[in-house]
Image (tube, rainbow, N blue to C red):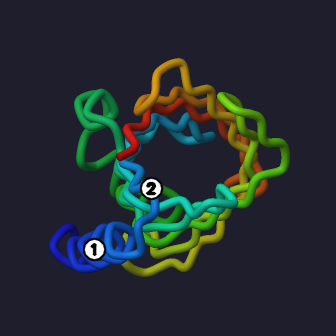
């Protein structure tokens, strides 16, 4: 699954750089109703601050130590080990160093389930190429919390 995601990530990076847009690499932690997840996203942002790209998210290392294989198998119908796909974010409020975006991620969970996750994310840029973010969203009709750090170039 990870090798399958490399092609869209490479495509997004090349397309973003070729079109003279800002490339954004983001790492994040998302607290879902089941457990925390860690993820990485790469995309680009145009001059209107619309952002789109690809992401990969998986269960956190802490969770894999806390649950046995049997427990994970028992939860397999609702347990999300991996979630990969594309995302699109549109600004709702935009200031110089602060932006609030409506974000939609869509992709495959565990390689078999199609998932759409809407969220609202706020980013603050304390330095030129670094921003920190927080957000709330919904997954399986339950709330999620997200924190992120992003590098832009």
Query: What residue is pinned by disc 1?
Result: 14
**Residue placed at 56% from the left, 34% from the top?**
31
Which sits in the foreground, 141 or 122? 122
* x, y percent for residue 99: 72, 38
Q: Callout 1: few (<14), some (14-19), or many (20+) C-alpha neighbours within 10 Å?
A: some
* x, y percent for residue 137: 72, 46
**Residue placed at 36% from the left, 73% from the top?**
12
Instruction: Name the mark on residue 22.
Output: 2
Instruction: Name the mark on residue 87.
Output: none
Answer left or right for 142 relative to 28: right
Occupied quadrant, residue 118: bottom right
| Picture layout, residue 72 above or below residue 107 | above
| Picture layout, residue 45 above or below residue 116 | above
Secondary structure type for disc 1: helix
Q: How many marks?
A: 2
Occupied quadrant, residue 56: bottom left
**Residue placed at 54% from the left, 67% from the top?**
52
Closer to the chain start, of discs 2 and 1, is 1
Q: Callout 2: few (<14), some (14-19), or many (20+) C-alpha neighbours within 10 Å?
A: some
């Amino acid at each position: 699954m990870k090798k399958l995601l490399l092609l869209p990530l490479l495509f997004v990076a090349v397309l973003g750089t070729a079109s003279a847009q800002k490339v954004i690499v983001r790492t994040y932690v998302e607290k879902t109703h089941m457990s925390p997840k860690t993820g990485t996203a790469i995309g680009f942002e145009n001059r209107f601050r619309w952002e789109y790209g690809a992401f990969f998210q998986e269960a956190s290392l802490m969770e894999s130590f806390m649950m046995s294989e049997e427990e994970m198998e028992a939860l397999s119908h609702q347990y999300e080990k991996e979630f990969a796909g594309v995302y699109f974010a549109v600004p709702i409020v935009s200031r110089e160093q602060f932006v609030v975006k409506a974000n939609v991620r869509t992709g495959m969970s565990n390689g078999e389930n199609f998932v759409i996750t809407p969220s609202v994310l706020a980013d603050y840029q304390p330095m030129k190429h670094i921003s920190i973010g927080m957000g709330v969203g919904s997954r399986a009709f339950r709330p999620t919390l997200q924190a992120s750090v992003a590098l832009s170039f």
